[in-house]
Image (cartoon, rainbow, N blue to C red):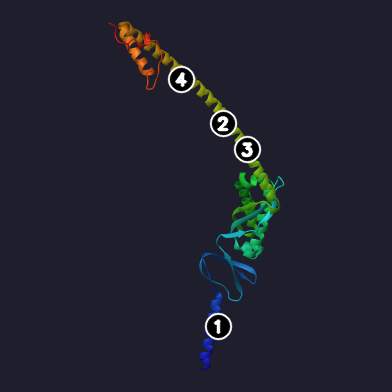
Amino acid sequence: MSPKVIITIVLVAVALIVLAAAVFTVDETEQRIVTQLGKYVRTAAEPGLHFKIPFIQTVHRFEDRVLEYDAAAAPIITSDKKHLVIDNYARWRITDPLKLYQTVRDEAGAQARLDDIVFSEIREELARHTLTEVVSVNREAIMEKVHEQCNIKAREYGVEVIDVRIKRADLPAEVAHSVYARMRAERQRIAKKYRSEGEEEAVKIRAITDKERAILLAESYRQAEKLKGEGDAEAITIYAEAFEKDPEFYAFVRTLEAYEKSLELNTTVILPSDSEFFQYLSPPTE
């Protein structure tokens, strides 16, 4: 191989190396800044192919997507001196890569600084509220205020805090048992109160029901006796009218009914032979 060919190959290789060092790409999920000997030159935020001075200028990559920061659980104290273990997270993004580079250098530094800001604001804000407010009543408003304060402080580092939330708020293990015991006792007290009120109401309802039942039975008995008396009176009237029409026949029918009821099988009746009861059984006299 001739020296000219070798030189050409070397020049081409050097040119390719220089070109590779002078060209860089920006993905749509990232943003980059270019520095020259440690000094800021420009920001490359548009996706595509970009150029820089090889070996002199340096490209620094930063995420352009929403990032999530998940903090370790940490203890805090509420305004009513209750201890809580708070597990929180935050969502954030880089809005000014140059400011972030100048203040905390990279994403790891930004996240470490964000950790301090978020925990400090959560601890300070929760210390102004009671345990009940933190757990159930005002959590939304509390976290919104924490988010606003965190965002204001994070802007100094070229970061926007999108959201801050509490994932879990637990009692410390050493006090959880006693707190849960008090909660159970309170629930049992409330349950007993409801039961006693229910039993009292049940007694009232039963008393009213028994009273109404007694009134209904008395009224029904009175009505039944009235109807029975009216029926008996009407029956006596009918009997009297029938008796007046044919007293002898009526006496005969009533005597036959008496025979039917008294002279059953294996029945012995001892009466004088001239008893009026046997007048229809005696042979007619001539």
Question: Which numbered disc flags the more N-terminal residue, 1 or 2?
Answer: 1
Question: Which numbered disc flags the more N-terminal residue, 2 or 3?
Answer: 3
Question: Which numbered disc flags the more N-terminal residue, 4 or 2?
Answer: 2
The residue beneath circle 3 is 192
Which quadrant would the C terminus be assigned to in this image?
Answer: top left
Q: Verify CB contact (< 8 Å) between mark 4 and mark 3.
A: no
Residue 148 at x, y = what percent? 62, 51
Gap in Å between the C-alphas at discs 4 and 1? Answer: 120 Å
- What amino acid does circle 2 point to? Ala
User: Residue drawn at (52%, 87%), measured in percent from left and top?
Assistant: 9
Residue 109 at x, y = what percent? 65, 64
Question: Which numbered disc flags the more N-terminal residue, 4 or 1?
Answer: 1
Quarter assignment of residue 80 = top right
Q: Within 10 angstroms of label 4, few (less than 14), some, or many (20 or more) residues?
A: few
Element at label 1: helix
Gap in Å between the C-alphas at discs 1 and 2? Answer: 99 Å
Outermost residue, bottom side: 2
Which disc, if any, is residue 14?
Answer: 1
The residue beneath circle 2 is 202
Q: In this view, does 90 lie to the left or right of 28?
A: right
Question: Which numbered disc flags the more N-terminal residue, 4 or 3?
Answer: 3
Quarter assignment of residue 21 = bottom right
